[in-house]
Image (spheres, rainbow, N blue to C red):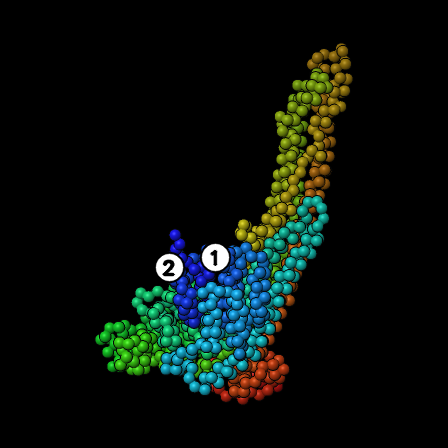
């Protein structure tokens, strides 16, 4: 029996819902459009329930994999068009949206490049960024994508594309029309758009330069590895060069992984700048339950259904509201349920925000709450702190008391004054944000919220005024109308420097650390050689003492052997001597002597290498550098060096090449037989003479063999030690040389990144001068060079601008600090 629509899941529709969430931002219009699409395409209750799970990131939601797997083969082309239409409809397809489309294609077993091919066939534009009159292009793109589709969802989606594009979008009035009213606003927005267009070119150029420099670093590091591999391409046993290549391969893998991460970060920063290009963006941040959603609802006049006691957050994503060219972004709470992932989502919006509004409450201001300010300073983001003064105005008596004297809650002095809270905020901010060049605006968000409720319609204006939310709205308006142009330059030029500073710091650290490591290895060359020579002599003395002791023991056993075997034939004598040699463990003791000497040498050399490794590790730790190169082996660089050195240190050998104890018996028998032939001698005399002859013969041979063995052991042992010494020295020299090359490659990249930083800082300095002189002009390198000399900047803290001309500054130092939120020093260079 066929299921009813309410009992079926509309998987293509759920893919559209997943794509809406793919970039970790929920646009207000997208959320509403999903509800409308659901109605127009007549999806069932189960599908609606699953859509809500996706929007709220419920732990039991169906994943992209689970949904895509259920889309019927005949529906897949159209489903792909649908999600791409949603992804591109705002004129920007983010990396995360592209990843989801590729993921779906892989699940369906589509060949690589099929998604791109389909987009190209529909006549999609190569440039996904729309500035100016782009609505027609956007609508036609959606129509082209879905021109052959005939499902209810696709038809509904085509109808919504025009609304999404903004051409038919209804512009809702903000509370008291504070942000959108009047020609002053329209002109400010127009000027912000012009500035953003020009400044983005500089940001894009610098970030692409950074991207290329990092990619070249990865390529050049691989060339270093290939060069050392070429040195070790010979046949036979592994050479020290091969060991160095193995070590450097581990280092290179770690560095390349880090480089890829830095490149991704740079690209994401560029995408964020691009995404926010046509908008002035304000982001609300702060810990959970600080009042962000309430503030958002007050400003946007939307989202009230998510506010109240026991209400759950509607989403764990950043929520985006747009009117004309302003964006208001609500982020998940810092420290909200979900933990670090929520903070990461909140962080993702910082790059594209022009102003950060950080919300705190007067009843829970803690130092840990302001840790997040350090990240904002790293991004050089302008800051407004909103102090939400909390009071339970739901109690009618407290509400009446509040309205009788609303100013009382905002008094600075006194037991219940907010002055102490503001001082704590500023003290913490100096520690984490670096300065207190920002405004702290106290408001009563609950009063503003109540003013919008039907029950308090008669006291609406009174409550709104008492909330002091107007002070904040005036400040936002000022940021947009008065300082919007410099705010846009701060986002596109000033803070973009941070996206280059991060990989620059990392590359600089690599250069310094590897340079230090290379110097240590090079300096240790002579020291290691001297120590190895000392260890060789010690081990050789030890070996020869052991050899002498073994031969002395053999000599001591000759008299008793001669007495026992004086009248044996050649075969018996030879067999007897072999037995005696085995009894006194002559050969094994010689072998052990050689092995013990080798172990002694190995141990001492390893300790010397380990000492060098410890120094290397200390350099690494002082440089705050992680040398854990493989997931399988968590040993440090120093210890890894010992491990690899140990592989080329180990020596051993056998004394079989020096001495054959059985062969000593040859020549004894003839002597004995000659002795026995004396027929008229007594038995005792014969025994005495034979034993004496055997003893003398064996002793002479043993003594001669001892001298031969001592000489050969010295020659062979020294040769082995010298081989070890050369391997160690070659290893150190090769590794030092290649580490130096890594350092040099890092230095070259460092210079390239510094060029990018200087390029942006000079452009930003010119924009600051334009703002200070109230004389904005198109930004070109020629104009920059004409006005700006040298710029020194301690990112996020201070910028010193050397100018080639006298600059008539029309703003006070306090005003400059408040807007730029860095110390600004202007110096005329004659």
Give me the disc on residue 418. none
Answer with left or right where residue 214 lies relative to residue 479. Answer: right
Out of 750 and 281, give the one closest to the viewer: 281
The residue pinned by badge 1 equals 71
Q: Is residue 672 visible?
A: yes
Residue beneath the point at 29% across and 73% down: 391
Residue 394 locus on image (x, y percent): 26, 73
Answer with left or right where residue 827 lies relative to residue 32. Answer: right
Answer with left or right where residue 643 lies relative to residue 97. Answer: right
Residue beneath the point at 42% across and 79% down: 171
Q: Assign a secondary structure to mark 1.
A: loop
**Which comes before the other along the chain, label 1 or label 2?**
2
Label 1 or label 2, whichever lies nearer to me, is 2
Residue beneath the point at 56% across and 76% down: 200
Quadrant location of the C terminus in the rendered image: bottom right
Residue beneath the point at 39% across and 66% down: 39
Question: Few, some or many C-alpha atoms within 10 Å of disc 1 (few <14, some 14-19, many ≥20)?
Answer: some
The residue pinned by badge 2 equals 6
């Amino acid at each position: 029996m066929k299921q009813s629509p309410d009992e079926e899941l509309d998987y293509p529709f759920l893919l559209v819902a997943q794509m809406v969430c793919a970039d970790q931002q929920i646009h207000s219009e997208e959320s509403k459009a999903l509800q409308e699409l659901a109605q127009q395409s007549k999806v069932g209750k189960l599908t609606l329930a699953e859509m809500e799970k996706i929007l709220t990131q419920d732990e039991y939601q169906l994943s992209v994999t689970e949904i895509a797997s259920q889309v019927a083969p005949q529906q897949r082309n159209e489903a792909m068009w649908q999600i791409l239409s949603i992804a591109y409809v705002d004129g920007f397809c983010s990396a995360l949206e592209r990843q989801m489309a590729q993921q779906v294609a892989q699940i369906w077993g589509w060949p690589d490049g099929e998604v791109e091919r389909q987009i190209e066939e529909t006549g999609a534009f190569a440039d996904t960024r729309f500035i100016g009159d782009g609505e027609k292009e956007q609508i036609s793109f959606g129509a082209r994508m879905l021109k052959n589709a005939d499902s209810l969802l696709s038809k509904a989606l085509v109808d919504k594309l025009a609304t999404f594009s903004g051409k038919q979008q209804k512009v809702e009035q903000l509370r008291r029309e504070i942000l959108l009213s009047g020609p002053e606003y329209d002109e400010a927005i127009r000027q912000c758009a012009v500035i953003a267009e020009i400044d983005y070119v500089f940001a894009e150029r610098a970030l692409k330069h950074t991207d290329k420099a990092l990619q070249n670093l990865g390529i050049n590091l691989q060339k270093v590895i290939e060069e050392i591999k070429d040195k070790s391409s010979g046949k036979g046993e592994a050479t020290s060069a091969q060991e160095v290549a193995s070590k450097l391969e581990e280092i290179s893998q770690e560095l390349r992984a880090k480089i890829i991460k830095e490149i991704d970060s740079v690209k994401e920063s560029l995408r964020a700048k691009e995404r926010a290009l046509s908008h002035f963006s304000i982001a609300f941040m702060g810990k959970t339950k600080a009042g962000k959603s309430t503030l958002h609802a007050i400003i946007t006049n939307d989202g009230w259904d998510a506010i109240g006691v026991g209400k759950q957050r509607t989403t764990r994503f950043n929520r985006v509201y747009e009117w004309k060219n302003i964006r208001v972004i609500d982020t998940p709470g810092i420290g909200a349920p979900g933990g670090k992932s929520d903070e990461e989502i909140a962080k993702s919006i910082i790059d594209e925000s022009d102003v950060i509004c950080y919300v705190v409450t007067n009843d829970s201001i803690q130092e840990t709450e302001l840790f997040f300010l350090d990240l904002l300073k790293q991004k050089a983001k302008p800051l407004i702190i909103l102090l939400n003064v909390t009071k339970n105005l739901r109690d009618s008596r407290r509400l009446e008391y509040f309205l009788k004297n609303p100013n009382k809650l905002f008094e600075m002095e006194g037991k219940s004054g907010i002055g102490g809270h503001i001082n704590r905020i500023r003290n913490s901010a100096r520690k984490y944000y670096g300065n207190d060049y920002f405004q702290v605006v106290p408001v009563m968000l609950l009063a503003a919220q109540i003013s919008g409720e039907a029950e308090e319609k008669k006291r609406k204006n009174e409550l709104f005024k008492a909330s002091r939310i107007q002070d904040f709205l005036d400040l936002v308006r000022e940021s947009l109308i008065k300082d919007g142009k410099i705010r846009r330059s701060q986002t596109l030029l000033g803070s973009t420097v941070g996206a280059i500073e991060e990989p620059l710091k990392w590359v600089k650290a690599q250069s310094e650390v590897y340079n230090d490591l290379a110097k240590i290895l090079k300096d240790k060359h002579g020291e290691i050689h001297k120590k190895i020579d000392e260890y060789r002599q010690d081990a050789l003395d030890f070996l020869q003492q052991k050899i002498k002791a073994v031969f002395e023991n053999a000599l001591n056993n000759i008299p008793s052997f001669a007495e026992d075997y004086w009248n044996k034939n050649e075969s018996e004598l030879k067999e007897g001597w072999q037995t005696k040699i085995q009894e006194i463990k002559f050969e094994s003791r010689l072998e052990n002597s050689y092995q013990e000497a080798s172990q002694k040498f190995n141990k001492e050399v390893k300790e010397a290498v380990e000492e060098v490794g410890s120094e290397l590790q200390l350099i690494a730790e002082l440089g705050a550098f992680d040398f854990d190169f493989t997931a399988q082996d968590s040993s440090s660089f120093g210890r890894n060096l010992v491990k690899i050195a140990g592989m080329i240190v180990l020596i051993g050998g056998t004394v079989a090449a020096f001495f054959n104890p059985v062969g000593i018996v040859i020549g004894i028998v003839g002597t004995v037989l000659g002795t026995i032939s004396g027929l008229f001698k007594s038995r005792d005399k014969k025994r005495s003479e034979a034993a004496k002859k055997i003893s003398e013969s064996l002793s002479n041979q043993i003594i001669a063999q001892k001298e031969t063995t001592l000489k050969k052991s010295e020659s062979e042992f020294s040769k082995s030690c010298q081989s070890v010494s050369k391997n160690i020295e070659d290893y150190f020299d090769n590794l030092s040389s290649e580490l130096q090359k890594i350092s040099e490659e890092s230095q070259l990249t460092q210079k390239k990144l510094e060029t990018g930083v200087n390029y942006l800082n000079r452009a930003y300095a010119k924009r600051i001068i334009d703002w200070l002189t109230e004389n904005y002009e198109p930004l070109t390198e020629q104009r920059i060079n004409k006005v700006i000399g040298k710029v020194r900047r301690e990112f996020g803290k201070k910028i010193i601008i050397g100018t080639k001309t006298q600059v008539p500054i029309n703003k006070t130092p306090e005003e400059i600090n408040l807007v730029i939120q860095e110390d600004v020093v202007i110096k005329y260079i004659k």
